[in-house]
Image: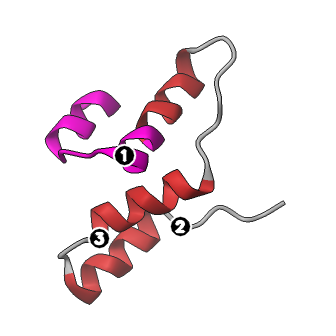
Amino acid sequence: GMTLRQLERRLDLAGDAAAYLRAVSAARYAPRPDPPTAEQRRALRRELASGQGFTGRVRTFWALPPRPRG
């Protein structure tokens, strides 16, 4: 098992991509969390797909799809 913080360090994430993981973690443990934003989610998806080619981008999109608006 890997924590979200360990994942952030392992992937060397920064900016909105790291903020997304922190917000997800806070949503689990904080009494009044701020939910992650759509931009943070997009940033993480971009970071994960970076340099992975077409197949890697598709896998990233499948693993972390855009959230439906609503």
Label 3 or label 1, whichever comes before in sequence order: 1
Most common SS among magenta residues: helix
Which dot marks residue 65? 2
- Quadrant of the image occupied by residue 70: bottom right
Label 2 or label 1, whichever comes before in sequence order: 1
Q: Residue furthest front?
A: 15
Above/below status of 30 relative to 61: above
Asked if disc 3 and disc 1 are in contact, CB closer than 8 Å, the reply is no
Q: Element under label 1?
A: helix
Picture coordinates of residue 26 (x, y %)? 53, 23
Q: Amino acid at mark 2?
A: Pro
Name the residue at 15% across, 41% down. Answer: 10
Which dot marks residue 49? 3
Residue numbers of the magenta segment: 1-20
Q: Which residue is mark 1?
A: 15
Which dot marks residue 51? none
Q: Quote the CA–CA distance across marks 2 and 1.
A: 20 Å
Picture coordinates of residue 43 (x, y %)? 43, 59
Q: Amino acid at mark 3?
A: Ala
Q: Amino acid at mark 1?
A: Gly
